[in-house]
Image (cartoon, grey):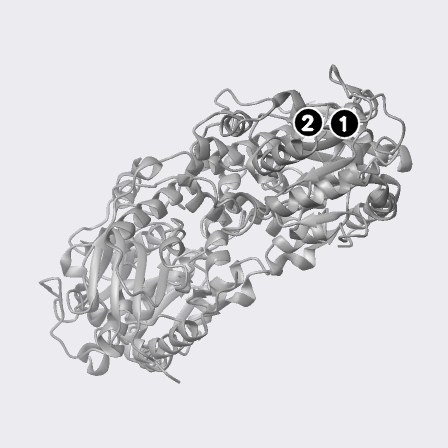
Amino acid sequence: MNILFLHDAFPAQFGRLALELVRRRGWSCRFLTQSLSSCPTPTSEMLEALEIRQIPLAAEHRSSEGIPWPQIQGHFLEQCQAVAEAARGSPWPRPDLVVAHGGRGAPTVFLRETLDCPIVVYCEYYFATHRRDISYRIDLPPAEPALFFPRCINAPTLAALVDCDAGYSATAWQRETFPARFHHKIKVYFDGIDADLYAPGPSSRRIGGVTIPEGARVVTFVSRGLESIRGFDLFMKAAKRIAAARPDVVFIVAGGEEIHYGWDKLHTGQPSFKQWVLSQDQYDLSRFAFLGRVSPEQLAEVLRMSDLHIYLTAPFVLSWSMLNAMASGCVVLASDVGPVREVIEPGVNGLVEPLFDTDRLVKTALQVLGDLGAYSPLAAAARRTVLDRYSVETCIPPLGDFLERVAGGAK
Amino acid sequence: MAQDPLHVLWIEPGFPGRLGGVADWLTRLRGYRSWFYCHTAAPRAYWPVSVGRGLEVETFGVGGAARDPAVAWTRTLERGLCYAYGCWEVLEKRRPQPIDLIVGRSSGLGSTLFTPVLYPSAPVASYLDYYYAPHQHDLADEAGPETPPSYYYWRRSMGAIDLLDLEQASLGWTSTAWQRGLYPTEYQPDIEVFPDGIDTDLFLVSPWHARGVGPRVIAGRTIPPGARVVSFVARTLDRLRGFDRFFELARKLLAARPDVICVAAGDPIVRRGLDVTFHNQDYFAHLKANHRAVDLDRFWMLGMVPPRTVAELLAASDLHVAPGRNYPVARSMLEAMGSGCVVLASDTPPHREQLKPGRTGLLVDGRDEGALVETALKVLADRAAYQAIGEEAAAAILETHSRDVCLPRLAERFTRLVETREARR
């Protein structure tokens, strides 16, 4: 089968999936994309096995960075047009199936003008107007677009949903964010954690030029961007008190300073949420290792040395990093929100506390750090959860079957 | 079923637009208190009587892309958001209170989109006009192979604002089943059909239609005795409403019968963006320049006229022609039927929904110029033979499309909506 994957970045959600489909099923997987991503970085194996074409950008193309919110939709439509034109001019054979991201980078809206094959959209998320995602952190100074942008951000998502043959979400929680009228179209298929790479094992206890002292406890925090939606500021609050309570704790923080979601720049008036957070309080930075963006291999190494992984997301798309941590056998302490609860059963395969309750977060973290052995069953159960429900080995076969069914005309 | 008085915020790009008449009726006859927010208001001659008597009209400005006379197709949604934001800005300053219900018609401009920021508990009823099919209906049915891909991209992108409106609305509402059927199947169960009706006090069977007696006066001009009047009415005289077809038909009728006078009412400037070729142009001037001349002594162009003048025209009409493309039925066709006119319409699904061929009107293929001319000449030659059609049309309209029939149902629905706060989110 020939699959054409469409996403504004590569590999993003599809690179690993496509590689597995090539390996396991011998399918041809091709990509039209706008940029090669550095998070995660494409592997050499991906670059060899997959055909990738970058979409030529129109002369008047603008980056979406800094565009006023009402203009974002026009930017999106220009992207869609570029994709449709690229597909029209492509020398590749007609695909049997198109698999595309259904959100802002949703490139499928004009594709029916060019291709006559079934279209599957990856239904990552449907934004809410309140009490979730970018509208959740009402504790931060208000940002002007917060009243308006969430009420129009879903336009491309809706257009893609109306037009597609089928869709899939990575988790049931994500699917539930979509309007109920579309649930019949959206199945739940997780796309798979590499449980071989993210696995418990001996650690060098050296990372990014930092050597972890013998006997030190390691607390990890990972996020693509260190931003409010992933609770970086709340982590730092808790970390400060953990550091004060235990002089043997080292904090390893992986993540860039880019803001991917919401209005942290407007909330804070500063380009880096991380720097703003650090400027709000006194931290003993000798206890923190900020690694910036890391490769999957480095991330695996970070997680192998973790004694406690803290994950403080707002109700939003579950980060791969939490599942990576669970696969690595970490004890995970996470915010008690819907997407986390779908995976973590508190006291069984992880721990949860209310997102804003620093007292309880600190207390629970100190309990874990004070008696690692007592919590090791949670870590083992976390890995089992990933192996049973979220690993590449478990997830790719049903997802591949689903794609095959849609390509064959079933939905 | 209760039809309680409600405080309603009405929002539409123009006033009175589509909702003005509805707001007027509900204000006068059901005790509503109405605030009508619009970007542009028509001259006062077009305003309904309840303005200043329970119905207050406020205008809002727009910024950004909405100020440009035309924008690239990719910026259509942005333009709509600018309208919605402009409306929100004025609402935020004036804050009319209390608001039980918000009724909006975005008309592609998303005007109610941000109102829940100010009125989170008020349900929103969105009037929906038209969902674009990429390759079907309106003028797309005639798009040739030379049509650029961007035309279809544009059409595919135009529904986004309606989808946002539908997601936000507690009630989606449209006038005909045909219009509802245009929307994606996922949304159709949540769209209810409520014809908003016509003013049957104004558009009623005239002495000319009832008994064949005059005098007949249209916009101050007296129709000579024995003349046959062929009428055409549209908000704008464009191809969507079949003005090109009417123009050709008129030329043939004027040539065939010296007693015929053709009268067109409507703005000669094409206002609908759907006609990309002639948008913002004077289409009548184009037709005159590119075709053989028409006898302007017997082809009367009234321009844009108030409803009372339209009523005069329809009251005097011997044949009303509605040769439009596949597009939501023009209110003027229903007004013509209500006035007792013999209506000759193009045979399209939206017209078939309103008109029973041979009983309440006549349908022919709008593309078949010969059939239009032949049928029109038959009617004009033997008016009496077709009078029953006009009578039955008027009776049907009174029964199904009078505001006094339609709007009590809508008032009941609005009351129920407010009572149950049918917020979907």
Q: Residue at x 90, y 36 (%)?
A: A24
In space, the residues marked 1 and 2 are separated at their CA atoms by 8 Å
Task: Say which of A42 and A51 sits in front.
Answer: A42
Q: Residues within 10 Å of mark 2 (few under 14, many from 20)?
A: many
**Mark 1, secondary structure of its residue:** helix
Task: Say which of B175 and A174 sits in front.
Answer: A174
B393, above or below A110, in the image: below
Q: Amino acid at mark 1?
A: Leu
Would you identify the image quadrant in which residue B341 lies? bottom left
User: Where is residue B402 drawn, in percent x and y?
Assistant: 32, 77
Instruction: Tell me the subunit letter for badge 2.
Output: A
Would you identify the image quadrant in which residue B312 lies? bottom left
Q: Are marks 1 and 2 in contact (CB under 8 Å)?
A: yes
User: Where is residue B327 drawn, in percent x and y?
Assistant: 43, 57
Residue located beneath label 1 in the image: A299
Q: Residue at x 38, y 41 (%)?
A: B79
Q: Residue furthest bottom?
A: B1
Q: Residue furthest top?
A: A209
Residue located beneath label 2 in the image: A254
B400, above or below A387, in the image: below
Classify residue B307 as left or right of residue B277.
left
User: Where is residue A158 drawn, in percent x and y?
Assistant: 56, 49
Classify residue B93 as left or right of residue A342.
left
